[in-house]
Image: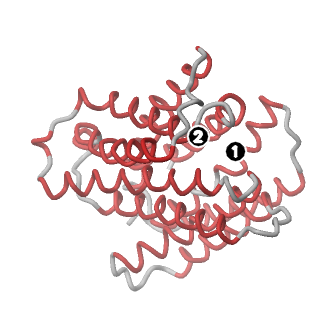
Amino acid sequence: MWILWAVTLLWAASFSLIGEFLAGQVDGYIAVFIRMLLALALFLPLWRPSRLGLPQQLALAGIGAIQIGIMYLLLYHAFLFLSVAEVLLFTIFTPLYVTLIDDVIFQRKHLPLRWWAAAGFAVVGAAVIRFNPLSESFLTGFLLIQGANLCFAAGQVFYKRLPLGDARNQLHVFALFFIGATLTTGLAMAAFANFDLRPDTPLQWGVLMWLGLGASGIGYLAWNMAAKRVNTAQLATMNNMLIPAGLLVNFLFWGQNVDWLRLAIGAAILAGAVYLASRRPAA
């Protein structure tokens, strides 16, 4: 569980870097492709194809394409229709999708009621923190974000249920995850990117290096490996802990305003959801 907390803090800091140094300056499709390419370069030297059968190799590449590749495509399109606050608000349903996908796809017909309750509390807690008035034309953006949420949730659950061996074996096959993501984002970049908005300063390249090698490379490996060691409700609720963590990082490093009352109430609800989920043994 501590790994999920550590990655949450890692990703919270990364969102701030994107907002401060890349958003509006570097095309999103280019930025995402560079991140995936750098992460792939990190794991390619460790890749041992013989450690995994062909069906599992294809499945792992497909998980990377869905969890990161398609998810990012939907997410960046959503920003054309929604404000940042609305994007954050609409991501709060991910815990419910994690629980639902694990139930339906893997035919776990008797998921404990408290797991569903924990996922629901995670949504409520995040809504308390991030709810803002909605714009008039939000339906398209809302649907795009729900597609992104479903992709991210499905990737986590599929990875959790895919037999990949111990941690050492996962390390030696994880390049496949980023092969799928790199191919998907590369095609999207070729189709949609504005190549006039390329990274052209040392600071932008430094941020991209960190995002690619740290947040994406180490972050996704650690998160997905940890997903195999916790139960479904713990994984679901932790998806929304990024919201209070991100707000705290923005306040501490960038001085952005925080509604402390809403943050405290929402964080308390989220903490209760994590506690409720943690009372079940790992599954």
Q: Residues within 10 Å of mark 1 (few under 14, many from 20)?
A: some
Distance from the alpha carbon under mark 1 to that under mark 2: 9 Å
Q: Position of residue 133 (x, y in %)?
A: 86, 65
To which quarter of the image does residue 171 belong?
A: top left
Q: Nearer the viewer, residue 61 or 7?
A: 61
The mark nearer the N terminus, 1 or 2, is: 2
> Which mark, by number, is residue 245?
1
To which quarter of the image does residue 22 belong?
A: top right
Q: Secondary structure at mark 2?
A: helix
Disc 1 marks a residue whose amino acid type is Ala
Q: Is residue 189 visible?
A: yes
Q: Is residue 142 above or below residue 271?
A: below
The residue that label 2 is drawn on is 11
Q: Residues within 10 Å of mark 2 (few under 14, many from 20)?
A: many
Q: Nearer the viewer, residue 17 or 103?
A: 17
Quarter in which the C terminus is drawn: bottom left
Left or right position of 11 against 162: right
Q: Is residue 87 above or below residue 174?
A: below
Q: Is residue 115 above or below residue 156?
A: below
Q: Is residue 122 visible?
A: no
Q: Are marks 1 and 2 in contact (CB under 8 Å)?
A: yes
The residue located at (16%, 36%) in the rendering is 48
Left or right position of 260 against 167: right
Disc 2 marks a residue whose amino acid type is Trp
| Mark whose residue sits in front, 1 or 2 | 2
Q: Position of residue 204 (x, y in %)?
A: 60, 22
The residue located at (79%, 58%) in the rendering is 129
